[in-house]
Image (spheres, rainbow, N blue to C red):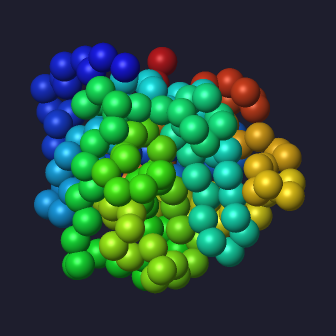
Amino acid sequence: MAAQALTTGDQGLPYVVFETSIGAFSVELYGRHAPRTCKNFRELARTGYYDGTTFHRVIRGFMAQGGDPTGTGRGGESIYGGKFADEITRELKHVGAGVLAMANSGPNTNGSQFFLTLAPAPWLDGKHAIFGRVASGMGTVRKLGMVPIDANDRPTTTVTVRRAYPAATPKLPDPAVAGPPGAPMLTAGAA
């Protein structure tokens, strides 16, 4: 994916909102600890890269993974043109539900895929770059963690990202203006 220029003001927005087929949630980005990872995630959201993707892997009581445009768990690339280096710090740990981290296939293989923890996962500390946490909508994340799955941890009920976008606050869209299932969600006041 060729990176497009950020619009004025988007570069430092501290949240990304995800509107999904089962509800919305927002994540706070830890730009001080993982600036390149946050920039990658924010820019992918801003350009619509995550729109239409699914959460392709859910392990109950552990994590939910998304961000792969192929839906296979093997796809996706960063704004940097392929993979990029880990930004791992001892200050951030997988301490509980709602931690946002990069999914990878080994050291320095970050692309577009990410996961949200559903419980503490200390065995991942030092192996995955943590770059944020759920700021609002944890009920949606809990719902995501309970979707039916098959023997390979693939959801049998598709959970789709309708829209992901950078935001100045963790405020979620008003469900009353979300529209019918499958329709794009609109924020309050949108035409």
Q: Position of residue 134 (x, y in %)?
A: 44, 63
Residue 161, by quadrant, is top right
Q: Nearer the viewer, residue 82 or 40?
A: 82
Q: Position of residue 11 (x, y in %)?
A: 17, 37
Judge whether 145 appears above or below 185 on screen. Answer: below
Judge whether 184 appears above or below 78 on screen. Answer: above
Residue at far front of view: 106
Residue 165 left/right relative to 154: left
Q: Residue at x 76, y 50 (%)?
A: 154
Residue 73 left/right relative to 45: right
Judge whether 30 appears above or below 161 on screen. Answer: below
Q: How many marks?
A: 0
Q: Residue at x 37, y 47 (%)?
A: 109
Q: Position of residue 29 (x, y in %)?
A: 29, 56
Residue 71, by quadrant, is top right
Q: Nearer the viewer, residue 160 or 120?
A: 120
Q: Residue at x 22, y 78 (%)?
A: 91
Residue 150 left/right relative to 172: right
Residue 127 left/right relative to 29: right
**Residue 28, visible in the rendered structure:** no
Q: Residue at x 20, y 46 (%)?
A: 36
